[in-house]
Amino acid sequence: SSPLLIDADPGCDDAVALCLAAADPAIELRAVTTTHGNSTVENTTRNARAIVELFDSGDVPVVAGAAHPLLVARSTAEHIHGSGGIRGDLPAVSGSPATVETHAAQFIVEQARAHEGDLSIVAVGPLTNIALAVAIEPALPELLDELVVMGGTVAAHGNVTPLAEANFHSDPHAARKVIEECAPTVVGLDATLQATLSPAWIEAIDRETRRGRLLAEWLTYYDEEALARYDLESAPIHDAAVVAHLLDDQLLTIKDCHMAVGTNSSIEHGALACDLHGISEEAANGRVALDADTDRFRDRLTGTLSEFLDR
Ligand code: BDR
Ligand code: CA
């Protein structure tokens, strides 16, 4: 199994992504680093700790990172994910979770150096921590096995503005730096809006257990209005699509291409531009997901989540 670090802002879909990573034996979850995003970093860190404890993965360190974007003002998404950044009645953090005092960005650099060539990073919040890490260690991309980020949109249209997706919109300067310097695999809304579970499967979750109740809440974080907006029957589990990609390299349709991110405060704020037809003649600087196989996603997720619920 390959070592993985998840940088996240839990967040309902982040929570499902963490669940998948913790429950699948093919992944060795090394650490969770946290960022501002769906809520403040204080809240996302507390949520991450509670989630990690819920999975009996209390020895997985949770390391707090950036409280604010690099240059723009902080925005949160509690109207979607719930007050405190997550839905459901997460248990209070008990005992003493493995606390690390280092800043997430420094921690990421140390982990990448310690596991040179081996560590993969999945970044599913605003990219502030990753941008700071590559500022500390410009060789970060070469030290990693793979960096996969959830963010951006190519042709699916944005979820914050017509052109911008939330993670890139929240910290466009960080997204730009990571795109320009880290050769990432970018998994945006084109793929993740197809990463849904069937309403019938969600309905059948046993709500008698705490895990069942929480999972059901996380999987239904979109209200009727949000579902109608994207013409969906159930909520997209964006961040879990990225973890599922690590487990199944046939899940996403991915293309090498040159990418850029807009950073001005106009309509291009946080917008991802992908040169899919090679019109700029710039060499590819990463890979972008254009599509996801919904059936494969469902098989992968429901298999692992069912096991997790029965445990
Ligand atoms: C992304 O934004 C966040 O609200 C979600 O957790 C996901 O990472 C989707 O645009
Ligand atoms: Ca997220």
Image (cartoon, helix red, strand yellow):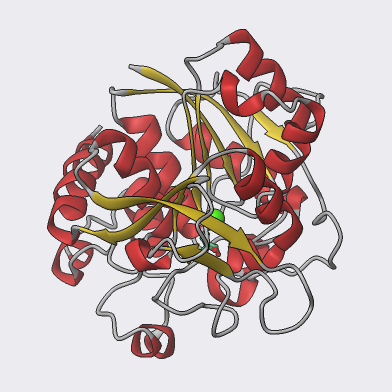
Question: Does residue 247 lie above or below 68 as drawn?
Answer: above
In this picture, residue 190 sits left or right of residue 259: left
Position of residue 159 measured from the top left corner of the image (x, y, whole percent): 52, 78
Please give the name of the residue rendered at 36% of the width and 46% of the height, measured from the top-left corner.
211
Residue 309 spot, x, y in % from top left: 26, 42
Q: Position of residue 243 (x, y in %)?
A: 37, 41
Q: Taking the image as drawn, is residue 119 in sight?
A: yes
Please name the residue shown 60% across and 71% down the image. Answer: 271
> Dividing the picture into quarters, in which one does residue 95 lie?
top right
Residue plotted at (46% across, 66% down): 279
Query: Along the line of sight, which residue is nearer the eye, 270 or 56?
Result: 270
Q: Nearer the viewer, residue 118 or 42?
A: 118
Q: Would residue 46 be seen by someone viewing this image from the given angle?
A: no
Q: Is residue 287 above or below residue 281?
A: above
Name the side, left or right, on which 274 lies relative to 133: left
Q: Quadrant of the C terminus?
A: top left
Q: Is residue 2 above or below residue 35?
A: above
Q: Position of residue 87 (x, y in %)?
A: 51, 63
Q: Quadrant of the N terminus?
A: top left
